[in-house]
Amino acid sequence: MKTFYRKKTRVIYVRKIPIGCNNPIVVQSMTNTDTKNVNKTLKQIYELASCGCEIVRVAIPKLEYIQRLKKIIEKSPIPVVADVHFDHRIAIEAIKAGADCIRINPGNIGGEDKVKEIILCLFQYKIPVRIGVNVGSLPKKYRNTKNRAEAMVAVLLENLKIFEKEKFKNIKVSLKLSEVMETIEANRLYIKERDYPIHLGLTEAGIYPDAAIRSATCFGILLSEGIGDTVRVSITGNPVLEVETAYEILSSLGLKSKNRPHLISCPTCGRLNTKIDLESIAKKINDSLKNIKKNFSVAVMGCEVNGPGEARNADIGIAFGRDTALIFKKGRPCKKIDIKEAVDELIKEVKSLL
Ligand code: SF4
């Protein structure tokens, strides 16, 4: 698989997962349950992990959540990043509770002295920190700036200097805005300054599919320039969609295998007078393939005249005629079947391939 030259970032570890340099891009997500509810949060973490999420972030808004965080970490199948704002004591307790990484915005944690206390604890427990600068939390002096990307990088560098003064380099960074082009610019500017690995994300990206399209545009451009070591597609709704979208983006770029079938389907056209509802058939087939953990391609084509040829690279496919459908493998005709049995027959053939 052809891939991109990656920028040489420093390697850090979140639990045992290496991040940075030429290590595989890591897919992250964040729970949206109330962290107080340990079972519900763990259930979501298991759902995320089962669809390929490799690192999960969990919000810890209050000190009294620490005991719950501890239980979550003990049972989580994937590394847990504690997301902390405003109170350095929460960050310190989260580290002591076993968090695999913490995410803070040093600008809102209570001043340099408090950040230094956190750094001491990070040293002691040997875990990394993600320094996350979001456009919503720019300090006052930058709020009316015309170039928000430049302001974000300036803030990040100010934050990094606090850590560097203490010689702490177990860091990854993120620069998140809700605008695609500004996020791209901020990350491009940052990579000229430092080599800490980068977590890519758009903030407040919106609902699905808009958020997925915006993220794909943003990450696609940055990743093609070798920028980005971990990704989170932020979507309002079920975070499982975030993970599925992240895999779709990374697999489209040849950067990660999604370990599930890849559906190809044609848009249909007036040329060949397709009589079937290809959209609902394609969706039905896609749903039936969802639980298969294998990388191969399945084509669903609107006509049997051009379909098998157009989808000749697919491992298996189906193309529809007036009353019958044709199953083909690598473009070669394999079986004619009744249209009514098309979906079931295709799935049967897929299973026999496995
Ligand atoms: Fe049109 Fe057939 Fe091509 Fe689909 S496969 S776009 S129906 S020509």
Image: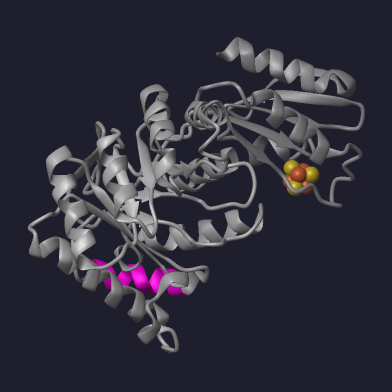
Q: Is residue 255 visible?
A: no
Q: Residue 32's spot in the image, x, y percent? A: 56, 43
Q: Residue 60's spot in the image, x, y percent? A: 43, 45
Q: Residue 71's spot in the image, x, y percent? A: 41, 26
Q: Residue 301's spot in the image, x, y percent? A: 74, 37
- Quadrant location, ligand no. 1: top right
Please give left or right for residue 202 compared with residue 239 in the image.
left
- Span shown in magenta: 182-191
Which residue reaches farthest front? 64
Name the chief secondary structure element in magenta: helix
Please give left or right for residue 206 compared with residue 176 in the image.
right
Q: Is residue 195 visible?
A: yes
**Residue 303 in the image: above or below residue 140:** above
**Residue 133 in the image: above or below residue 322:** below
What scheme was used to colour the molecule?
A: one colour
Which residue reaches farthest top? 352
Q: Residue at the spot x=66%, y=52% of the render?
A: 208
Magenta residue check for 240: no
Magenta residue check for 185: yes
Q: Residue at the spot x=44%, y=39% of the render?
A: 65
Quarter of the image where the C terminus is located: top right
Quarter of the image where the N terminus is located: top left
Q: Residue at the spot x=77%, y=30% of the render?
A: 284
**Residue 352 in the image: above or below residue 84:** above
- In the image, 26 versus 265, the foreground residue is 26
